[in-house]
Amino acid sequence: MRIQLRLLTLGVSAAMIFGACSTPGGGSTAPSTGASVAPSSAEPSAAASPSAEPSAEASSSVEPSAEASASAEPSSEASPSASADYQSYKACVAFDTGGLGDKGFNDLAKKGLEDAAAAGFQTAFSEAQGATDYAANIQRLIDEGCKSIVTVGFNQAQATIDATLANPEVAFSQVDATWNEAGADFTMGTADDMPFPANFTGLDFQIDEAGMLAGYLAAGFSKSGKIGTYGGQQFPGVTRFMDGLAAGIAYHNEKKETAVELLGWDAAAQTGTFVGGDNPWGDPAKGEQLAKSFIDQGVDIVHPVAGATGNGTIKAMLASSKWAIGVDTDQAISLAEYAGAILTSAQKVIDVAVLDTFKKNVAGDTGGENYIGTLANKGVAISPFHDFDSEIPAELKSEIEALDAEIAAGSVKVSDYLK
């Protein structure tokens, strides 16, 4: 049997903007590229003594601040001795390039780590400044005594595979990856004749389901009848957002007999507009240029799937009194200065998945399965409408709620509207 780590859902902020480099803690040495490994508490700390074990200031009575019901899986009921178990268990996250402060993908995982610290876990984290840091950062976390390590982003796949197979006593999980049998369309590493490791959990998100809701909203709200989208790079995790948007528009056109157009992505041909280049995820100026190009073509709503590059698009849409759809997190909150342009966001509930994985691991379930966040288990969603709540017609809201229920029940499928 040939087993592959299938990378299904790229969080668009997996390589957003370069966050500040934290000072290494716990006696570890930063790699020459500038990557850091640091202890973490409710706020990441850079002042740990070299001789001290990195730990979190935590209270066992503090519950995770994320909505606990946001993900039915992978969750485990805590035992009466959970707080004691947590205090002796070190839960860690290896962040991708872009690092903390990206207002998206990495920060969502950071929130899960902070909630783990609040629940009583010892915690630590590492930040990568480049691809050469991945393996070294994971090894440093292992050396510091981490018992559960979540790696963030598809780029860390090979390093995660290698560490998982070499360290069966450590529980590994990867955000935006699943371990599947041969046949994956896109892979960053393989393990021949290797069954699903008992110490690995894939954490993936069916974000096209939330994207379909966002697409339906965009089609119903647009005044020009033209929607735009683009991605940072053409990976399945990026195009899944775009597929969802396309499906929602197609569904609206079918049900309401409209002819709303999507520019920037042909779902049937799987071709479209991508930033590319050396910095596809962290170039807001390029995002502004793309927004202006779409606006010149009559587009009044854009869904950028390109990390911090997309922030420039949202800024430009606001300046032009037009609208945008956010990605990964509720960007009307994380990019509050641009909230006046953000209709909604297609969200991955990464923070809850990270916390639930730590709880599952400490309870003795170290992996051997994939978790897929869906509308049905509340692992993906669209964000509240915030400033636009009064502007979106009640009928459109009702239709979106009905579509949400139909997708969750399986009676409406994204794939049926990508032809």
Image: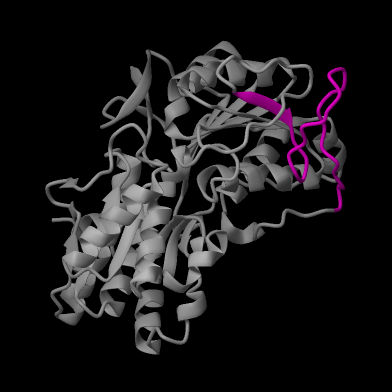
343 vs 72: above or below? below
- The image quarter containing residue 361 is top right
- The image quarter containing residue 86 is top right
Residue 205 visible here: no
Q: Is residue 246 left or right of residue 150?
A: left
Residue 185 visible here: yes
Camera-side residue of 253 and 371 = 253
79 vs 167: above or below? below
Magenta segment boundaries in residue numbering: 35-61
Q: Check residue 37 for magenta coloring.
A: yes
14 vs 338: above or below? above
Tell me the quarter of the image containing the N terminus.
top left
Q: x, y (%) of residue 49?
A: 86, 23
The prevailing secondary structure element of the residues shown in magenta is loop
Q: Residue at x 51, y 22 (%)?
A: 160
* Colouring scheme, one of rainbow, by chain, secondary structure, one colour: one colour
